[in-house]
Image (cartoon, grey):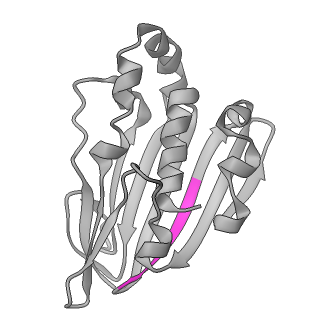
Amino acid sequence: MRITTLAATAFAGLTLAGCINVDLTATVTGPDSVRLSGYTEVQTEILDMMGGAAAFCNAEEGGTLEMTETHARCNVLIEGTFGEVFVAEAGEPVPTATDLGDGTVRLSFPVRQMTADASEMRNDPQTMTMMRPMLEGQTFVMRIAGEEIISSNGTIAEDGKSASFGFPLIEVLNAEYQFPETFEAVVRY
């Protein structure tokens, strides 16, 4: 399960039924290598709308499915080059990684592009009414990590080894909420 597939699954879940939590960390491990870890969690009742458990959490792409009576959780651990981990279908936004040549990499996630489809939900009053209670209390969190965060437009952790960007999913229904163009960090590996 590649990062863009995870993000697409998360936002497809939003448009289908909400009730999704996402927490992902991309740890830069070298000039062209990254480890992606974290999870995506949905209510079990919406798995069929998302294409079933196998579509939600593909074991061949690094996913491990955990099921309870109420939730399905796809735990992810993928390691490889940026090109192997950050795969996109045609037209999907894709993160970019630039080796700065000094032991650091600039990693950038296109947040505004990833959330662009939410405007379709806001334009449909019936969808808005249905989605509002489903999105309450749900979150989307993304982290960039490494040996040291040099700079970021996200929140840098106290230990200086990661930066995060997150938002309550209910904000996708708020036309006035300003998603940043990107979430990025310069990270030493």
Furthest-front residue in this view? 90
Instruction: Mark yes or no: residue 13 visible.
Output: yes
Furthest-bottom residue in this view? 102
Q: Please report the bounds of the magenta region as a residue range.
A: 32-39
| Quarter of the image with the N terminus in it | bottom right
Residue 63 at what x, y percent from top left?
67, 62
| Number of residue marks | 0
Residue 150 in the figure: left or right of residue 35 = left
* Residue found at x 38% / y 30%: 118
Q: Is residue 23 above or below residue 145?
A: above
Magenta stretch: includes residue 22: no
Residue 68 in the figure: left or right of residue 117 = right
Residue 42 at what x, y percent from top left?
63, 39
Residue 5 at what x, y percent from top left?
52, 54
Depth check, front residue: 51 or 158: 51
- Main SS category, magenta section: strand
* Residue found at x 40% / y 36%: 168
Depth check, front residue: 54 or 76: 54
Magenta stretch: includes residue 33: yes
Residue 151 at what x, y percent from top left?
18, 70
Q: Is residue 130 above or below residue 8?
A: above
| Quarter of the image with the C terminus in it | bottom left
* Residue found at x 46% / y 41%: 139
Q: Is residue 119 above or below residue 144?
A: above
